[in-house]
Structures are given as structure tokens and as C-alpha cells.
Image: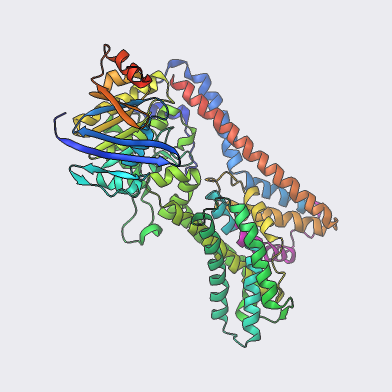
């Protein structure tokens, strides 16, 4: 981690009718940093990361990547800019196989064909998945296995591996271990730890303070659509963080 | 899509780190194998059901397996099969299109009007059939995707009425007799004893099977059906994919219109009435899930054949047509229960895999 700012959010405002989800949020993310984004339900964490990942547009404010303003109109824009997101609740397509899930949105086709009618190069995708999984040190699941028949941990491993493999700048993880057991969580944490070594920065939303202490370099707390404080996560600072989340002074 | 099921007994050979598998797995693996075989059977189910039905009908009636009857069966089934192929795409993307029967009728009437006006160019008729169908499908898709009405059933019930009304208005409620030769050949001709409509439906089935199983568009169709929002967030152009399914479904209804007009050699404004339900039934009996994301083109054809065999067989045995409706209704319920059973088995298998990893 160094001081170079990779991602910056300035003055983010978003409201849904009478509900203000984001009320002027400023956030800086440094290169190779793991930033924990904490807060109670409805504090605005998911809205903030949705704005950064392009699936929700801000009413006001801007998102800058390496100092350049991003025009984020879709998830595709963020992905092309090097921002990958692991969405809440096991973001995989249960009816597709492992390799299809890994390459969804950037499928490999045989050359010489017109756009969507291009023939899929299933072999290349299978090989790509196998070599990426080996490199990341995760279970090399059979690329042809239907993902819906797998355990939560196996599915989440594929979703996280997808983000880790293709992100060049930022990975956002929204509760990546919420649906997982202890053992399965450990594997996901291992993957997250790989990212700073590749120069990729991480925004991690988690309710699990153990994970936050284990992984994060810095924790930012949101409350009622605003940043209410920040701290360096450690065993000692957990009570302070929890107090900030609860809104106690 | 991925018909390969996780082979739990082979797991050790598939992984680089075997530390996660505990030694007490073997009983679980055996039980999982049983589940897998059950699932595999369910997923190839429609073909077995068709085979069983054919055998039963052949035993019950000596005429069933005659060439004459089989030709008849194929010609009768071709229209519903054509509609079912398009319907499958729509159902895979979590929709349904109950307007196809009306679209069929509308295309038939327009072809009849062209005959009245003296346009008899066969190619022109074929193009108009398909184009009018595709246009109508595009309208359905547009209302669902952009019109902010995320209820395909309601939208297409509305356009079912609109389509039929247009057919009746344009035709003035009367029938035109005598279609152009190309259309008549497509719906009624035969080559070496094989009915042309059956050949055409066969070719379209193969084409659509290749497109859905081998191309990027095919994967997108299933991805959108699996979870429209997640697919969209992960870079699949959801709205365009859904539109494409409705457009092709409409075009297939236009194609079915060619077969209908050709077979009857007439343009009736009531053509295709009720067929929308047959097409949905065929898709469901063919094992597609109404929850989207699951279904296979070839199985939709098999589903249409199952309906055709039930109808034809009961006809041959001079059973009252009222029983026919009951038999087909019962088979819909049967197919839906099979889908429920499939999802139950999948859930159990998933739980077992998860447990074996703890």
C-alpha cells in the first residue's frame, strides 16, 4: 500500500424518493489498500458500492479513477475501467457451468464470426479457468460442472476468482462471506489477501469484525448516508468501530 | 448448457488441494450418485415419455404406426412445434408469449389480403409472414423491456386480443380461399413421402439448437434466464437478449402461419386460435422450467410431439375429444410436478456437496 490515490468519490448524493441513501459522501482509496466499509443496515454502503460499480447512477457527485472522472452508466463501464465487483448473496448464475460463470460478460469465441452469433470457444474457457484457479491456489472445479449444484463456498470462490482474475485496479466485495461456513470463508479471505500483492485495491463490506481486523488496512464507517468516522482496525479498536456503527459518541 | 453433473466420486481427481475432503465421504458419495442418476433421468425425461407413449399407442391401435398416420401426425404437429420452438426461447428468459396464436392468425390474414390484391409472388409472401410475426414479437418485447410492464403474461394477453382483433378487422371476418403455391407446398407438400412442414421444422430445430447451445447469444439467453439482474451486472446485454427472444418467437409464429395457410389452403381470421396454450404446454412437457433458465430446444420439439401423439392416438381410438383436453391437462400437471421434483433433487445434491466439504 502506498499513498497514491486510485479511486476517489466526491460529494456522492443519491436518494430514492424521500429516502436519502447517500448524503454527500467523500471517499479515497489508495493503491494496494484493503478498505473496510462498515455500517449498519441502510447506512448507504451498498448504494455507495453500486455507484462505484456502475449499476446505479448518482444524483450528484463524481467517481474518479486515477484522477480521471468516470462516466459510469453501466456495470460494463466499470469493468472496462478495471473495477470488478462481487455482488451480495452469491453472484453466480446457478444454471450455467463453472467456466461460463467465470467468463460471463467476457466470453471467448472463435474468431471470424459476427458478434453475438459467434461460436463459443468452450475449450479455451475451460483451460483459462483451470490455469487461473491453479494460479490462485483454489480448488480447480470441473469447468463443465453446473454451478447451482455446488456448495456456497465453491460458488463464491468462482465469483471471487472472477473478480480477482480480471480486476486491474479495484475489487469491490459486498459481504463476500455472509453465506459461507468457517472453512469456506477462509478460502475467500485467502483470495482477497492476494489482491494487494497484485497492486489491486479492495473495498470490503463486511459485518464480520474478525475478518475486518484480519484483512483491512483501514476501516471507514458509514451512518445515515454519510461517512461518520474511520480507524485502523485492530483488536483494540473494534469497540470504537462498533460504537461508531451504532452511532454512539 | 451444462448437462454434466458434479461427479462427487471423481472429486479427488479434479482438485489440486485435497485437504478439504474428509475421509468419511464415501457413504455420502454413494447417495449422491443415486441423486445424480435420478436427476439425469429427469432431464432426459421427455424423450422417454414420448417413446413410452408411442409404444403404448402402437400396442393399442394397429393404425398408429402406419406411414399414412405418421405423415398425418407430423403435419398436424408441425405448427405447434414451430410455435413451441419460439416459445421455449421466451420461457428460458423468464417470459411467456401467449399472443402467438393471434400472431399466426394475423399473418395468415395478411397473406390472404395480398392474394386478394393480386400479389402472388411466393417469396414475397414468405417474407411478409416472417416479418409481420417478427415485428409483432418486437412490439411484445418492447412493451416488456422498455414499456416498464415486467409481466409478460399480462402484456401478451393484451396483444393476444389486439392481434386477433386486427386479423378480424382486416379480413372483415371472412375467409380467403386459395394461397400462393409456395405457401401451399410448405404447409401441405411432401418430398419422398416426408411432409415438407416436418422437414422445415426439423431444419429450424437444428438451427436453433446450434444457436442456443453453441453461440454467445445462446449462453446469454440462459444467463438472463438464470438471473436477469446478475447477468446484466456482469456484462450481458439483458434487454437486447430478452427482445431477441420475443422477436424470434414472433417470427416463428409467422412461420407457423405459413404452415397453417398452406395446410388449409385458406386464410381464416380464426387461424391459430388456442394454439398459444398448446405451445406453452409443449415447452413445459418438454421439461423447461417456467422459472426460466432451463429448457432445451430439442425437448420443446419432443414436447410438441408428445401432445401430437396423445391427440392422434386418442383420435384413432375414437375417444371423445373432451377426454383429449383432460389428458393434455393432466400431462401438464405431471410435467410441472417433474420440474418440482427436479429442483428438490438439485437442492438435496447441493446440500450433500456442501456437507461433504465441512
Mainly helix, strand or loop, the magenta region?
Answer: helix
Question: For the view shown, which residue lies furthest in the top direction?
Answer: A236
Left/right of residue A150 with respect to residue B174 in the rendered view:
left
Q: Is residue A41 magenta?
A: no
Quadrant for the N terminus of chain A in the image: top left
Residue located at (48% from left, 59% from top) = B244
Report the side of B227 relative to A58 (left or right).
right
The answer to whether residue B346 is above or below residue B44 is above
Q: Quadrant of residue A161?
A: top left
Residue range highlighted in magenta: B60-84
Q: Nearer the viewer, residue B288 or B173?
A: B173
Q: Give percent across and percent down for residue B336.
A: 66, 42
* Residue drawn where x is 65% and y is 77% of the image: B184
Q: Is residue B67 in the magenta section?
A: yes
Q: Most extreme residue toward the left, as rendered?
A: A3
Closer to the camera in the image, B122 or A121: B122
Above or below for A62 versus A222? below
Q: Position of residue B199 (x, y in %)?
A: 59, 67
Q: Residue at x 45, y 54 (%)?
A: B239
Up/down of B321 relative to B182, above or below = above
Residue A126: horizontal and vertical position, in percent? 35, 42
Residue A44 appearing in the image: yes
Q: Position of residue B64 (x, y in %)?
A: 76, 58
Amino acid at each position: 500500500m502506498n499513498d497514491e490515490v486510485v479511486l476517489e468519490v466526491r460529494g456522492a448524493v443519491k436518494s430514492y424518493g424521500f429516502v436519502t441513501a447517500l448524503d454527500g459522501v467523500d471517499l479515497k482509496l489508495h493503491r494496494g489498500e484493503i478498505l473496510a466499509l462498515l455500517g449498519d443496515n441502510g447506512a448507504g454502503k451498498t448504494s455507495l458500492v453500486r455507484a462505484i460499480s456502475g449499476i446505479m447512477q448518482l444524483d450528484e457527485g463524481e467517481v474518479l479513477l486515477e484522477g480521471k472522472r468516470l462516466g459510469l452508466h453501466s456495470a460494463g463501464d466499470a469493468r472496462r475501467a478495471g473495477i470488478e465487483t462481487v455482488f451480495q448473496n452469491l453472484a453466480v448464475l446457478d444454471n450455467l457451468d463453472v467456466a461460463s460463470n467465470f467468463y460471463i460478460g467476457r466470453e471467448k469465441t472463435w474468431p471470424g464470426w459476427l458478434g453475438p452469433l459467434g461460436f463459443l470457444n468452450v475449450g479455451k474457457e475451460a483451460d483459462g479457468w483451470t490455469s487461473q484457479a491453479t494460479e490462485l491456489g483454489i480448488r480447480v472445479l470441473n469447468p463443465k460442472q453446473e454451478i447451482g449444484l455446488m456448495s456456497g463456498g465453491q460458488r463464491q470462490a468462482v465469483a471471487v476468482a472472477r473478480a480477482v482474475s480480471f480486476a486491474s485496479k479495484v475489487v469491490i466485495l459486498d459481504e463476500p462471506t455472509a453465506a459461507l461456513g468457517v472453512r469456506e470463508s477462509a478460502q475467500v479471505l485467502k483470495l482477497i489477501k492476494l489482491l494487494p500483492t497484485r497492486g489491486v485495491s479492495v473495498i470490503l463490506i463486511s459485518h464480520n469484525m474478525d475478518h475486518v481486523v484480519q484483512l483491512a488496512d483501514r476501516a471507514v464507517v458509514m451512518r445515515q448516508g454519510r461517512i461518520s468516522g474511520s480507524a485502523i482496525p485492530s483488536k483494540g479498536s473494534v469497540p470504537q468501530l462498533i460504537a461508531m456503527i451504532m452511532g454512539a459518541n | 448448457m451444462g448437462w454434466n453433473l458434479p461427479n462427487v466420486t471423481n472429486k479427488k481427481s479434479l482438485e489440486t488441494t485435497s485437504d478439504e475432503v474428509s475421509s468419511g465421504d464415501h457413504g455420502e458419495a454413494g447417495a449422491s450418485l443415486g441423486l445424480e442418476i435420478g436427476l439425469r433421468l429427469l432431464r432426459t425425461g421427455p424423450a422417454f415419455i414420448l417413446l413410452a407413449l408411442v409404444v403404448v399407442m402402437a400396442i393399442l391401435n394397429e393404425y398408429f404406426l402406419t406411414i399414412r398416420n405418421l405423415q398425418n401426425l407430423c403435419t398436424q404437429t408441425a405448427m405447434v412445434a414451430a410455435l413451441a420452438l419460439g416459445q421455449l426461447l421466451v420461457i428460458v428468459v423468464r417470459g411467456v408469449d401467449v399472443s402467438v396464436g393471434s400472431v399466426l392468425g394475423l399473418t395468415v390474414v395478411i397473406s390472404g389480403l395480398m392474394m386478394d390484391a393480386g400479389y402472388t409472388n411466393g417469396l414475397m409472401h414468405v417474407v411478409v409472414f416472417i416479418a409481420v410475426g417478427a415485428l409483432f414479437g418486437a412490439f411484445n418485447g418492447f412493451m416488456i423491456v422498455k414499456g416498464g410492464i415486467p409481466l409478460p403474461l399480462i402484456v401478451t394477453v393484451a396483444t393476444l386480443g389486439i392481434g386477433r382483433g386486427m386479423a378480424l378487422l382486416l379480413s372483415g371476418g371472412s375467409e380467403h380461399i386459395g394461397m400462393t403455391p409456395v405457401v401451399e407446398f410448405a404447409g401441405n407438400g411432401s418430398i419422398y413421402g416426408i411432409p415438407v412442414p416436418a422437414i422445415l421444422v426439423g431444419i429450424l430445430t437444428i438451427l436453433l439448437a446450434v444457436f442456443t447451445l453453441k453461440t454467445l447469444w445462446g449462453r446469454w439467453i440462459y444467463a438472463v434466464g438464470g438471473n436477469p439482474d446478475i447477468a446484466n451486472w456482469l456484462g450481458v446485454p439483458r434487454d437486447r437478449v430478452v427482445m431477441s427472444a420475443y422477436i424470434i418467437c414472433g417470427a416463428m409464429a409467422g412461420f407457423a402461419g405459413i404452415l397453417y395457410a398452406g395446410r388449409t389452403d385458406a386464410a381464416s381470421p380464426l387461424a391459430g386460435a388456442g394454439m398459444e396454450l398448446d405451445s406453452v404446454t409443449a415447452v413445459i412437457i418438454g421439461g423447461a422450467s417456467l422459472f426460466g433458465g432451463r429448457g432445451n430446444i430439442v425437448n420443446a420439439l419432443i414436447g410438441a410431439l408428445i401432445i401430437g401423439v396423445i391427440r392422434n392416438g386418442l383420435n384413432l381410438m375414437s375417444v371423445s375429444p373432451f377426454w383429449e383436453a383432460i389428458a393434455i391437462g393432466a400431462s401438464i400437471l405431471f410435467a410441472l410436478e417433474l420440474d418440482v421434483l427436479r429442483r428438490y433433487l438439485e437442492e438435496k445434491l447441493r446440500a450433500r456437496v456442501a456437507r461433504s466439504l465441512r
